[in-house]
Amino acid sequence: MKVSNARVCVLRIEGTNCEEESYLSFKRLGAKPEKVHLKQLTRTDVTSDEKRSLADYQILVLPGGFSSGDYVRAGAIFAARMKSRLSRDLVEFVRAGKPVLGICNGFQILVETGLLPAMSGIMTEVPEAVLSTNDSARFECRPTLLKKVNRGSCAFTTKIPSDKISAIPSAHAEGKLTFPVDRAKRVVKELADNDQLVFKYVDPEGDIAGYPWCPNGSTENIAGICNREGNVFGLMPHPERVFFRYTHPDWTRNPDGAGDGRAVFESVLDYVSKKL
Amino acid sequence: MAVVEVRITLKKGVADPEGKNTLKALELLGFEGVREVRSVKVFEIETDGETEETERSVEEMCRKLLANPVIHNYTIRIK
């Protein structure tokens, strides 16, 4: 499919943020994004011309923010509302190989929905992981350095060289990717074997390092994971906030080239143009 | 009508930064002899039903929304 025909659903509810940046990232690259409220997909309290169908889109984006005030747990209410009415549509979407991107709160939503890590099947009934409170118990907001550890499965990182250290900002209080305590090691190994690990937090040399390089104490420094097929991807840092070089904090010293986040959007549009 | 109390606690071995930080702040304020602080979340749910059926439905609420089985235990008490 042509990129110019690729329709992108940037899904929001109350408390979503960065939907504008996510929307613009796709628009600047020639795709057809649209900001859609969840009620438009569930067809509740909307007029007939506001109604939308998930099946009409090629990419689904869950942006960052604090949906529903992060009540109960970050992303839990958005996830519950999606699951209640859109389960079948979501499963169909993912099964068709269409890409789903969850950024920050969007990643939390994908995990709470059971679309990630989804080690068995497309969507698990109960979550297999959680993004729990940062070890610091604080909101951590600053640039973080990421290294791609994915070997090629993830549709969102094909245009990122494996030796590149991407500077992508984090801004969250619940970003510590946590698996059941009694089998965390096994789960991480399985994720690695399935090529579901995508990004890890590193220091400037590209080595795994503790706080503050890793802002949250995440299991094995994991910053982003994908499903087995690589078309559902979630990460805590915000690639849409560094689409341009000049939104990097060191842009006056390194003014040339694109922002480090741009490659994520280029990768997935490349995927859409080749696979859909 | 019944009032159901749902108590969400962290599983053993799961980090509790909120509890730890609260402990630290209490120590800074000069409180002595505080060994540990654990954060717990409580929901009070008013329902129409009574007894067994209520308990089953609240159990389902915990599974579907209130708790994440990866890190949480929950207890249900009908008041």
Image: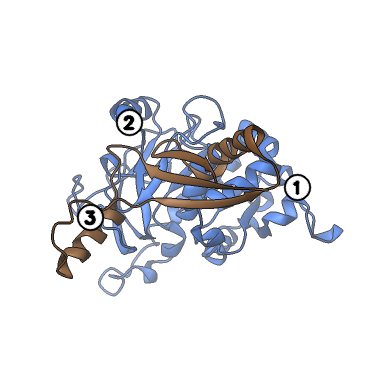
Chain colours: A blue, B brown
N-terminal label among 1 and 3: 1
Q: Residue at x 42, y 42 (%)?
A: A130
Residue A95: percent from left, percent from top: 62, 31
Residue A69: x, y in percent?
52, 62
Instruction: Report the residue that reaches farthest toward the front.
Output: B79
Residue tagged 1:
A53
Question: Vertical placement of A129 versus A103: above or below?
Answer: above
Please tell me the numbered disc located at residue A188. Answer: 2
Mark 2 belongs to chain: A
Q: Which mark is residue B18?
A: none
Image-quadrant location for residue A150: top left
Q: Position of residue A259 (x, y in %)?
A: 39, 62
Q: CA distance from mark 2 to mark 1?
A: 35 Å
Report if the CB atoms under discs 1 and 3 are less than 8 Å apart.
Answer: no
Q: Is A219 situated above or below A34?
A: above
Q: CA distance from mark 1 to mark 3?
A: 41 Å
The kind of secondary structure element at disc 1 is: loop
Chain containing mark 3: A
> Residue type at mark 2?
Val
Q: Amino acid at mark 3?
A: Trp
> What is the C-alpha distance between the residues marked 3 and 2?
20 Å
